[in-house]
Amino acid sequence: MSAEQFKTKASDPDWSKRYRETKDLPWYLASIDHKVTPETRTLLENYSNIPAGDVLQHVRDIRDKAWAIRSYPCTGLGNFLNPMIPKCPAYGTIIKRLQSGDSLLDVGCFLGQDLRRLVFDGAPSDHLHAVDIVSHWDVGYDMFCDRGRFSAHFMEADILHPNEALQALHSSIGIISITHVFHQWGWDDQIAAGMQLTALSRPGTLVVGFQVGTVGENLIKASDLAKSDCYWHSPETFQRMWNQVGEETGTAWASEAQLKTWEEIGWDPQETAYLGEEARILQFVVHRTR
């Protein structure tokens, strides 16, 4: 496999392009109206100034636009409507650090929904950076109606193969948020990604987020729906991964991770049944101690 083929395979999975023309998939719901929670409405009505009666059609239209770009589960299941970062145990600390001048990078930012929630809760948007392998940034502006007043800096880049714009942030980021990214890769790619995050970090940096984890076998073999092998973590293997990242980079990392049930994060387990009975959500806060 050539370097370019590896890059495409690892960072922009083929399946996310292949299924854009169909909605007959286990990760596509016919309706996502029930995903518009009171918190979602508050954000869209009070931050985005969308009239209450227009909210449901607005989010349906946004999903159609996002699905046309990539057929991600977070799009098909409507999970983008509920930002994950407020569920992070360190959320209060993150807000305070941003208000005190720290910076945050959202890796795999998608529409920028977590960043909008941070701003709504008091974080200055000019302290925020965002990166994704495929840009949905304009769809994010369409969703939140904040073009011209939302100052986060977006880069279309591959975290495994950082471009010049991403490299310019080396050693400067105090908080890295990375959700629904690690679990798409095998162990080696996750180590590579961790090393790239380390390059962006400094002592004291927090790496926070969520990803699919497991109470069973960690190596998830390729299937008809997902064509590449993945490594899903337990809290123990996640710390082991960061130990290896530390050894490779001369740094040290302390991970606090827990496996959560779908119900604990507010998701319907029937909607994620295609992932298997042993799948859970791994919630993590990782602190760079050296």
Image (tube, rainbow, N blue to C red):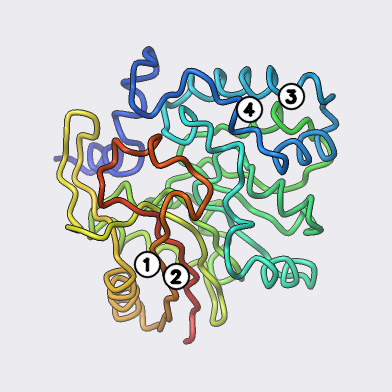
Q: Which mark is residue 195?
A: 1
Q: Are marks 1 and 2 in contact (CB under 8 Å)?
A: yes
Q: Are marks 1 and 3 in contact (CB under 8 Å)?
A: no
**In-image side of 20 versus 241 (left or right):** right
253 to 138, vertically: above or below: below
Of labels 2 and 3, the one closer to you: 3
Q: What element does badge 4 sit on?
A: helix
In depth, the one of 203 and 211 nearer the eye is 211
Decide which of tag 1 and tag 4 comes sooner along the chain.
Answer: 4
Disc 2 from disc 3: Cα separation? 39 Å
Residue sitting at x 53%, y 31%: 78
The residue that mark 2 highlights is: 198
Decide which of tag 4 and tag 3 comes sooner along the chain.
Answer: 3
The residue that mark 3 highlights is: 55
Residue 288 location in percent, x, y?
A: 49, 79
Amino acid type at circle 4 is: Val
In depth, the one of 260 and 13 nearer the eye is 260
